[in-house]
Image: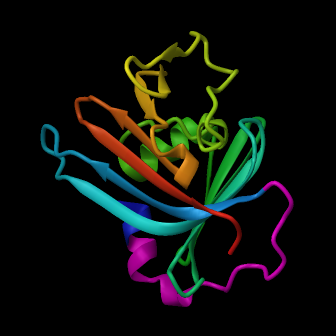
Amino acid sequence: MWVLLAALALGGCAAPPAATPAIGTLYGRLSLQVEAHADRPAQSLSAAFELRGNAESGELRLSTPLGTTLAAAAWAPGEATLSTPQGQTRYADLDALSFATFGETLPLRALPDWLKGQAWAGAAQPAVALAPGPGFTQLGWHIDLARFGSGQVLAVRAGPPAVRLRAQLDDAP
């Protein structure tokens, strides 16, 4: 079962987010679509997000438009946790967390850098510039920065299954 979809359905049970924004925190809205593949149906989610930290340690909170926290992923070296209204689950790392949650390994460690419009320095292979247009390819994903000036980042993996992550960054909550 898809943990974040359940969290979206039960979001009214979660506590409200902290009122004080943290320095260096990214805010916005994101949508994720995972194409149907083999025996798995297509999946999607859309939520407001708050992301603080970097590839080594941080926190990603997903919330409703009214600010109710739906789910929060936190990570540090050697562990990652997912907190939902149903409780907290621990994982060895962000790859294990994303696979258990989405059925796909998503590049969550790279996300803080990608949302800042830069390649993740921790990738084993260097990023390759997209031609034509602004952006790059990294970890099998195309990071389109054509609308970065207006706060939009699009990350696409061809698949299978194809995965599309779109983020619209805001200045603050």
Q: Position of residue 124 (x, y in %)?
A: 61, 12
Residue 146, image quadrant: top left
How many numbered circles does the render carry?
0
Along the horizontal axis of the image, is 157 left or right of 80? left
Instruction: Give the residue furthest to the top.
Output: 125
Along the horizontal axis of the image, is 19 left or right of 92? right
Residue 131, image quadrant: top left
**Figure check: 66 above or below 60:** below
Point out the stretch of residues depicted in magenta: 6-24
Instruction: Give the residue furthest to the left.
Output: 39
**Figure check: 126 above or below 17:** above
Instruction: Please name whichever residue, 33 or 95, is drawn nearer the observer in this view of the structure.
Output: 33
Coloring basis for residues: rainbow
Instruction: Please name whichever residue, 73 or 61, is drawn nearer the observer in this view of the structure.
Output: 61
Instruction: Please name whichever residue, 9 or 35, is drawn nearer the observer in this view of the structure.
Output: 35
Q: Residue at x 67, y 85 (%)?
A: 16
**Figure check: 17 above or below 32:** below
Q: Quadrant of the C terminus?
A: bottom right
Instruction: Please name whichever residue, 117 or 65, is drawn nearer the observer in this view of the structure.
Output: 117
Q: Residue at x 55, y 78 (%)?
A: 85
Q: Position of residue 45 (x, y in %)?
A: 36, 63
Q: Residue at x 50, y 82 (%)?
A: 65
Tell me, yes or no, whether the highlighted magenta stretch contains residue 14. Answer: yes
**Figure check: 84 above or below 78:** below
Q: Position of residue 164 (x, y in %)?
A: 34, 44
Q: Residue at x 78, y 79 (%)?
A: 18
Residue 1 seen from this side:
no
Prevailing secondary structure class for the magenta stretch in the rendered image: loop
Tell me, yes or no, whether the highlighted magenta stretch contains residue 127. Answer: no
Q: Position of residue 126 (x, y in %)?
A: 59, 11
